Amino acid sequence: MNTNEALSRRSFLKGAALAGAAAAGAASLAGCATTDESLSSTGGDWMPAQWDYECDVLVIGYGGAGMWSSLIAADEGGAEVLVLEKAPIEGGGNSRINNGEWTVIADPERFKAYCKSFSHGLMEDEMIDAYVAEATRHTEYADKYGMSYEVAEQALAGTIPEYYFLDNDAYGGCIQISSVDGFGMQTFRELDAARQELGIEVLFDCHDEHLIQNPATKEIVGCTTMIGDEEKTVKARKGVILTTGGFEFNDDLQREYLKCYPWHFEGWRYNTGDGIRMVEEVGAKLWHMSMVISMSSMYTRDPENNFGVDAFLPTNSFFHVNRLGKRYVNEVNNGETPHNGWHVYTQFNDEIDDYDRIPTWVVFDHTNFTSGKIGVSQGDFFECGNMTSELPDELRDWDGWSEDNMAELERGWITKADTIEELASKMAEWDPWMSAETLRATFDEYQAICDAGVDPKFDRNPETLQKLDGGPYYCYTLYPGSCSTLGGPKKNTNAQVLDTRGEVIPRLYAAGSFGNFQAHSYGITGGNNSENMTWGRIAGRHASSLDNWDGADA
């Protein structure tokens, strides 16, 4: 068979993977090599005729978890590692564009109790134990790879841990946090330098992967991938580690799994849930699929800039309304937390058979519009997300907020009208549930509240009750979103992916936001980066310890 014929087998390989997942009798791998007999017993029809690339450990996804998996597999395991990354150049995922904080465990036993408490028992004891045993080594590994950080008592995102007050304030101080100047960008540069020193190769513009599975042993032996518009096969002699991130930019998966809808995220646009499809094809069990780390974002409502944005009004002359035009919250203390703020948007209203706070409309006046910029710009203190200045042009989604808000107004991210009724009419073009009559009544009620200096329904601080001026008036939308989804394949204490019967799918691993082990709520401050470090190291260490499936080192 020539090269073109071999590469044309992609559709067949997809079918082979599905057939392999459905076959009975999967066995857990115990570190021994697959024998020639087990290969020949299947007839070898599932095996590619040739391999375009070969390695010991294949890592799919070059974010934080992919970085740690590849470093440890190469450095500690002595493995030849190859990384496939979806982005056309560089990489880094959400880990590169977040604030860089990671968990430092100060009191392991209290932290274990905290995990059981905030997860309401959904996090298994053995998984918590494995996490703690590895996560207590974070500073050791940070020092080993020359990471810049300081251990702090206070997180940029607020108090730590998230639900310290549970069980009569039992958990305050059980963890600390790293403080990283330069945020995730700094960490990415430092670890990528270590990757280069170890000679780990990264291939970019890799997409549409399908795992190749031995239908007899259920072992994952490699994958097919498209690199640009060419199909390639990749052999992984020891194992495959999936670190493909979340599904923030996959509407179908959001609608199917998240607890409300729709969402609009501001992160790594290549996180489209590719890994979910890959593991489903080989029979994996999914877990924690409703888990999200997120507050809310201002949504652009712009098809050419289809993402969320951090936005903060400069004055207090504003109020929030739901889809029907009614206030529902104290706007300056609305219950949002930096990591679980999306919870306030889950209100379902049977009158409209939908979530009536998605979107939430922020209504404000001309004084507010002209008092300062509303969104985050490059060079600001909290320069994170998909507009970060250090991202290459090919990866940056936009260049940050304008100083006078005019660019965003012209793009339609902000809506302007001369009267409240006209503003309501323009809102209704986006969401027909908006009522001009109701919005006018809400406006009049808010103005009266400001005159009285008392907010009887929502107890907004009187010092923040600032009337709106005579117009023009403006609005933008808030949606749940901002950070990342956390669901994916269930794994064990070795980061090995499990099938629907709870058995190991041999030679397949998962780490990072792709199958995060936190459950019920996001409770571990710095947990996403800590998740990358913990399970990335565990996966890299275990995968690199295996014998080669082809018997080459037997």
Image: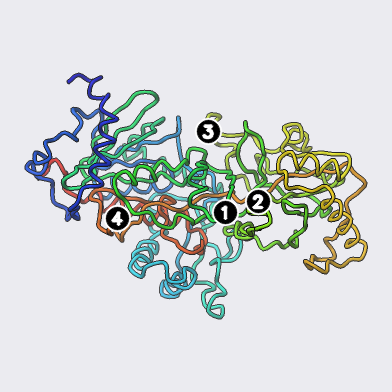
> How much space separates mark 1 and mark 3, taking CA atoms?
29 Å
Residue 90 numbered mark, or none: none
* Secondary-structure class at tag 2: loop
How far apart marks 2 and 4 lie (CA) works out to: 35 Å
* Identity of the residue drawn at 21% across and 51% down: 545
Q: Position of residue 481 (x, y in %)?
A: 59, 49
The location of residue 287, given as percent across then percent down, is 40, 57
What kind of residue is marked 1? Cys
| Amino acid type for the residue under numbered disc 4 | Leu
Picture coordinates of residue 30 (x, y %)? 17, 56
Mark 1 secondary-structure assignment: loop
Q: Amino acid at mark 3?
A: Leu
- Residue annotated with mark 3: 395
Q: CA distance from mark 3 to mark 2?
A: 28 Å
Residue at mark 1 to residue at mark 4: CA–CA distance: 27 Å
Which residue corresponds to mark 4? 498
541 in relation to 123, above or below: above
Is tag 4's residue or tag 3's residue first in the polypeptide sequence?
3
Residue labelled with disc 1: 260
- Identify the residue under disc 2: 358
Does the residue at mark 1 contact the one at mark 2 (Cβ under 8 Å)? yes
Position of 488 with respect to 374 (left or right) is left
Q: Residue at 37% across / 63% down in the picture? A: 131
How many neighbours does mark 4 have within 10 angstroms: few (below 14), some (14-19), or many (20 or more)? many
Per the image, label 4 sits on a secondary structure element best described as strand
Q: Mark 3, mark 2: which one is toward the viewer?
A: 2
Residue that extends furthest to the bottom in the rendered view of this protein: 168
Element at label 3: loop
